Amino acid sequence: MSESNQPKIFALVLAAGVGSRMAANFPKQYMIIEGKTMLEHSVNALLKEPRIVRLVVVLSPTDMIGMGLTFEDPRVEVARIGGNTRAMSVKNGLAYLAGEENVWVLVHDAARPCVSSTDIKSLIDTCFEKQQGGLLASPLSDTLKIASSEQTVDKTIPRDHMWAAQTPQFFPLDKLYDALSHPSEQITDESSAMESVGEHPLLIKGSPFNIKVTRPEDLDFARTIIHFRNAQ
Ligand code: CTP
Ligand code: MG
């Protein structure tokens, strides 16, 4: 794809969840890591990519914290348009961004504050070069077990060809919106929505440090990664 016909790039940062598995008394995206909220780290990581021209932070309609954060960068807007599920938050965010032609959107979890700008660049470059949507992901190295209800091993499954999906995920805005119009329990990320309409998104190898902060023990890991990166 030549420079002149490259699509515009918008971004959605999803921060409308409640963080039930973190079990804090406020949503996990507002937990502090190295002096900033997890949400701010995630937004700032995306803002390092100059090709992103607009970024919308999706908050819950009942959010009382995020509206009080100040994002100096004029590309950032904050909107209380989240839905009951992650997929609904994405769909509402896409509807909010809609209206222009030839737009691709990076969808990123606020709960992944350790994403690197190098990985974001490689996702965009590869998808544009191949003219195909894709996602950051990491090949699995652990042996995988399917557990029984008694927490014993039922079965070992070969890990060859197994990747753990991360975010950002990067797709043409209108195609992603259409794919999300067929609601299903199986749609847990943007890739699965695109797969459900027959697409085969590109797996772009990202750093295994792009963890999703889900449970309390993940927070120390995220703090260590960000501390180490800031010190470099
Ligand atoms: N998210 C969202 N809207 C929802 C649910 C989730 O925007 N209705 C966002 C979360 O804020 C998070 C990302 O999607 O940044 C990934 O979701 P997850 O890690 O599951 O966060 P929560 O849903 O908040 O956590 P939990 O599932 O433990 O309640
Ligand atoms: Mg969740």
Image (tube, rainbow, N blue to C red):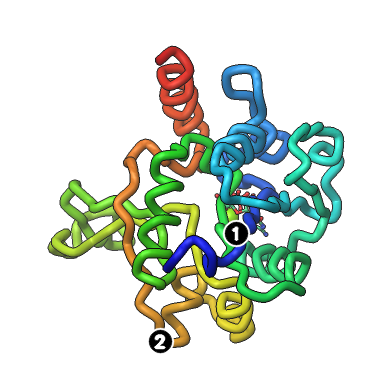
Query: Which residue is disc 1 drawn over?
Result: 9
> Residue at (79%, 39%) from the top-left corner?
66
Of circles 2 and 1, which is in front? Answer: 1
Ligand 1 contact, mark 2 (Cβ < 8 Å):
no
Q: Amino acid at mark 2?
A: Gly
Res. 84 image quadrant: bottom right
26 versus 142 height, above or below: above
Residue positioned most to the top: 231
Q: Which mark is residue 49?
A: none
Question: Residue 85, how many percent across, how many down?
Answer: 65, 65
Q: Say whether disc 2 or disc 1 marks the residue closer to the N-terminus.
A: 1
Residue 189 appears in the picture as rendered: no
- Quadrant where the N terminus sits is bottom left
Residue picked out by circle 2: 198
Relative to 67, 160 lies left or right: left
Residue 214 lies, in percent from the top left, at 51, 42
Horizontal side of residue 7 vs 70, given as left or right: left
